[in-house]
Image (tube, helix red, strand yellow):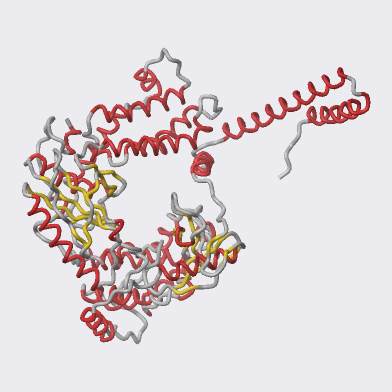
Amino acid sequence: TSTYIHPNIKNLIKTLNKTKKDWQTLRNPSIKTELNRIEKLIKKLEKESRQKDKTEELETLNPENGTLWTKAKIMRRKAQKIPALKGEFKLALSDPDKAETIAVSLEKQFSLNNLSHSETEEEVNESTNNFSPPINNNYQNDNINSIQPSEVIKIIKKLNIKKACGSDGITNKMIKNIPCTMVFALTEIINNIFNFNYFPNAWKTAVVVPILKPGKDPTIPENYRPISLLSTLSKITENFILDKLNEHLIGNKILCPEQFGFRKSLTTNHQLLRVVEYITSGFDRGECTAAVFLDIQKAFDRVWKQGLIHKLIMYKTPPNLVQLLNSYLDDRKFVVRIGNSSSESKTMKAGIPQGGKISPVLYSIYVNDIPTTHKTLLGMYADDTTILARNKNPKYTAAAINQHLQKLEDWFVKWKIALNVSKTEAVYFAKGEKKHKPVIKIKNKIIPWSQQAKYLGIILDNKLTWQSHISSIKTKFRNVTRKLYPLIARDSDMKRKYKILIYTAILRPIITYGCPIWGSAAKSNINKLEVLENNIIRQICKAGWYMRNEDIRKAIKLPSLKDFIKKISVNFYNNIENIDNEAIQQIDKYTPNIKSKRPRKILL
């Protein structure tokens, strides 16, 4: 795009060129002085012009039309170009070569783990081979009610027009503007998918956009995370398949209560609460807790499809739905796209489609029969799995954990799930220093005890002081603030109410994530976070040194961080009673104590 040049600058440039020629010819010092003066004046006018453009841009930013959030998103996540990649035999320099190199890497990723258990394989083969869905001569499934156009319209209205399209090139904006006749046609296609129990092959190809994993070497293809773009028509249809599947799962109470991932009313905070309450209640009784945080290799990408279908059959899923889900999972493909170049189509030999509406629930079904023991606590959120055991005697704790781990090892092999032992962490939670800690083993390898572990975005240190987590919050907060500084700086010309909106919508959630769990931390730790907030608020409001933080917050009607954390926590704990989940209801009910480290202390 061409840059607009002010007429004054144009005239000065002409004068500059003439003066430069005079200086080169005459070498008169007074001409040189004039030349320097003109150059400085041009630079000053250019700077003022750029500042004016920037001011106008900031003044036009508005949350209602989305320009404010778009600008903030661009500043937070700047796209990085993929450099030359190290392929198997050569360097990939061009975009087509890079796309193909990453596609070959992902094809290996979407394949079964090299694990075998003959008895389970025979059982699965027999089950899936003997499965015979009912024959439907009338092409009309009596067990599944027909989808109505009004239901399709309801889902279409919820589509986000800013989401990228799949391989068919049909955008969400196109679908939101289709005429009624097209809605009727789409409804008929969806009903026929249910009638024939067949998912269209045209919707089974995903476009994969590779995104570099944080802190990884950009020249290695395996260090890129695949972001799959699926057809929107496929996603609309998946909503109805998911409804039928959930109806069966909820109606028959099939999913285990320990799995909190992708469950209604359950969040990461609820699973974290189970874990932290288990540890802190042990502290109150003088018990130590051993916790192992398991790392499952490529959990979603290496699901054994045949094993999943077998489990659907075992859970007495309606046969028509089993056949449709088998069609949905079968013969899925993907292409990698970099810039305008795409790789050749590759086959997914294992795994469930990333980005699919049904995929999270299918994974929950696949791991639903994970072994449990009465001596340990099992916590799951999707593929994030932890087991805990507590006792005053470290030997008992070790025996309980090792017994559970042995059961898990056997179960992982049966269902071709690989555990990454090197990334699996263990933490021994105790009030005081413990010189003699028990030995924990996985696959005959001793797992070393760590001082802390990160679980569901929260750092749990071995004494639950929350110091490490709060230090992590400070680092992350400052990094994001640095990226957004041009918008919220003192000299930024953006309206103050929009600066405050950026703080409350983007920056404050970084601080408050998981606060019902760690909000009972020592005052000295909470004060560190209040300092972060106060500094940003003073910057946004251009406050002088003589202005009190309390007066500033009162003027802009912003509650203090402490009050805001307490408000979130009160709502969180009040809503727990209404959650219909056995694992949640088993959490101890107690009156908060000021001397205790337990999470509900925040309510005092």
**Left or right side of 311 for 330:** right
Residue drawn at the location 25% of the way across and 51% of the way down: 266
Front residue of 8/442: it is: 442
Residue at x 72% of width, y 26% of height: 45
Quarter of the picture holding the N terminus: top right
Q: Which corner quadrant of the image does residue 479 belong to?
A: top left
Residue 416: quadrant of the picture: bottom left
Give the image location of residue 363, x and y in percent: 30, 65
Q: Look at 37% across and 82% down and name the residue there.
A: 139
Is 44 on the left or on the right of 318, as rendered?
right
Residue 544 screen position, x and y as percent = 45, 15
Q: Quadrant of the C terminus?
A: top left
Q: Position of residue 555 (x, y in %)?
A: 39, 20
Specify whether 46 is left or right of 280: right
Q: Nearer the viewer, residue 25 or 94?
A: 25
Q: Does residue 265 lie above or below 511 as drawn? A: below
Residue at far top of view:
546
Q: Is residue 11 above or below residue 118?
A: above
Number of marks in the rendered image? 0
Q: Which quarter of the figure has residue 340? A: bottom right
x, y percentage for residue 382? 29, 58
Near-viewer residue (248 or 39) = 39
Q: Residue furthest right?
A: 25
